[in-house]
Image (cartoon, helix red, strand yellow):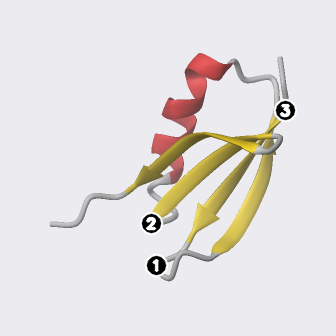
Amino acid sequence: MADYLLYGIDETGEAVFSEVVNECDRAALRARAHERLRDWPAVEIWEGPMCVVRMRRTTA
C-alpha cells in the first residue's frame, strides 16, 4: 500500500491542512475524503504527483 497526502482546502482554494494517509487501500480513499469534508470545504488526496481524489462540499 502506498502513502497518500490528504489536503484540507479552505474557501479560497488554499491548502490549510495536510496529513499523511498510510495503510489505506486506494478503494477506501473516497470514504476518507468524504469524512474530512466535515472539517474542510474541499479535500484532495494525492499519491506522489497525481491527485487521486478531489471532493468539494455541495452548496445549497
Q: Dot 1: what SS? A: loop
What residue is drawn where x is 67% and y is 57%? 7
State the separation of the CA atoms marked 2 and 1. 6 Å
- Dividing the picture into quadrants, the one containing residue 24 is top right
Whether tag 2 and tag 1 are in contact, CB under 8 A, the answer is yes
Whether tag 2 and tag 3 are in contact, CB under 8 A, the answer is no
Question: Quadrant location of the N terminus?
Answer: top right
Mark 2 vs 3, N-terminal side: 3
On the image, numbered disc 2 is attached to which residue? 41
In the picture, measured across the screen, residue 32 lies left or right of residue 50, that is left
Q: Dot 3: what SS? A: loop
Q: Amino acid at mark 1?
A: Glu
Crowding at dot 1, Cα within 10 Å, few <14 / some 14-19 / many 20+, comes out as few
Q: Residue furthest front?
A: 49
Q: Is residue 27 above or below residue 51?
A: above
Q: Is residue 15 above or below residue 7?
A: below
The image position of residue 28, as x and y in percent, is 58, 23
The image position of residue 47, as x and y in percent, is 77, 37
Q: Amino acid at mark 3?
A: Asp
Crowding at dot 2, Cα within 10 Å, few <14 / some 14-19 / many 20+, comes out as some
On the image, numbered disc 1 is attached to which residue? 11
Crowding at dot 3, Cα within 10 Å, few <14 / some 14-19 / many 20+, comes out as some
State the separation of the CA atoms marked 1 and 3. 26 Å
Mark 2 vs 1, N-terminal side: 1
State the separation of the CA atoms marked 2 and 3. 23 Å
Q: Is residue 46 above or below residue 15?
A: above
Q: Amino acid at mark 2?
A: Pro
Q: Nearer the viewer, residue 40 or 47?
A: 47
The image position of residue 56, as x and y in percent, is 40, 56
On the image, numbered disc 3 is attached to which residue? 3
